[in-house]
Image: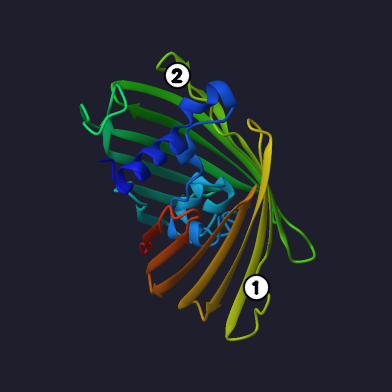
Amino acid sequence: MVTMRQKLRTGFIIIITGMFLQAESGESGMAFLKIPVSAQTASTMGVFAQVSGTPFTIFDNPIGIINDDIRIGFSHNFWFADVSGDALAATIPLKKGNLGFGLNFVKIPGIEIRDIPSDESLGEVEAQYMSAAVGYAYPIFSKLSIGCTVKYLYEHLYAENAGGVAFDIATHWQIPSGMDLALSLSNIGQMQTLKDKATTLPTLFKIGIVRPEIFADSPFNVNLGINLIANLVTEKTYFQVGGEIAFTDLIKIRGGYERVGTINRTALGAGLNFGRFEIDYAFIFMPDGLGYPNLLTLSYRPEL
């Protein structure tokens, strides 16, 4: 008998690849490119990627890698049905701008193979997805910045492999009213053929608005943000909102909400700052009983 765990695992691979659906429905694939990589991103649905300064924003918005310190991070993502992901990222300040590096790896083990509907499988395989990114961000003026990321993409499914290249470009403007406005275009590129068809990348156009440091002079600080997103392949639009409360830079409490069509997702998270170390955790409430993914991220700022 096929268990619920096996159904979830099978469902996840269909969602994350999209290649089995795109030929008929026009859906984009490589959906792992839209999955949050770090706890900071997941807990706020990515609305602070443009201003966070964390190295993992290289996977969301290259503008976010701008900061004054070297930062190194590791993130582990516990999804469901044994699906997991790991990511490494770093950002380095240069004389002009910041350079960022990132490696994101997602695996789906224990996928059972059947050639006909049956309780007996022919064996198990593992699907793998990888993104290796190099990015650069540069402040043109004091309140205007631009950034670009180049990503090498790889997917392995059963006995098939394919690679590809994609680009992300973004700009960020600090509006005089105190808000931050960012525009980005992600996953511009192409994959090689996998099983007689190249997987279509989820090209996203995003408008992000952040109101940072609402109570800058108080013991706690509040940041609020919203993303408006258009998938240029599926022509679908959706939005994300998020908030963060910081208590004297020691403790951060976060929350986020996303609505895609009729599907709702919410997330909660927290971060603790221990000098040059930071630990962050996020918990996502998935719809339709798919499970409760959680992410754990560790970051370090070496002393120069």
Picture disc at residue 19: none
Picture disc at residue 213: 1
Q: Is residue 97 visible?
A: yes
Count of residue discs: 2
Work out whether residue 199 or residue 133 is closer to the camera in this orientation and state it: 199
- Could you tell me which residue is drawn at 39 percent across and 59 percent down? 294
Q: In the image, is residue 28 above or below residue 206?
A: above
Residue 160 x %, y %: 33, 21
Q: Distance between the residues labelled 1 and 2?
A: 44 Å
Location of the C terminus by quadrant is bottom left
Residue 216 x %, y %: 65, 79
Residue 166 x %, y %: 52, 30
Q: Is residue 110 left or right of residue 296?
A: left
Query: Residue type at mark 1?
Result: Glu
**Most extreme residue toward the right, as rendered?**
177
- Label 2 crowding class (10 Å Cα cut-off): few <14, some 14-19, many 20+? some
Q: In this view, does 19 lie to the left or right of 140?
A: left
Residue 70 x %, y %: 42, 57
Work out whether residue 273 or residue 34 is closer to the camera in this orientation and state it: 34
Query: Residue type at mark 2?
Result: Gln
Work out whether residue 183 or residue 121 is closer to the camera in this orientation and state it: 121
Q: Is residue 229 visible?
A: no
Location of the N terminus by quadrant is top left
Indicate which disc, 1 or 2, sits on the residue closer to the N terminus. Answer: 2
> For mark 2, what is the residue?
192
Q: In which quarter of the image is residue 115?
A: top left
Q: In the image, is residue 229 above or below residue 271?
A: above
User: For the residue labelled by badge 1, is the local secondary structure a helix, a strand or a loop?
Assistant: loop
**Most extreme residue toward the top, as rendered?**
196
In this view, the mark in front (1 or 2): 2
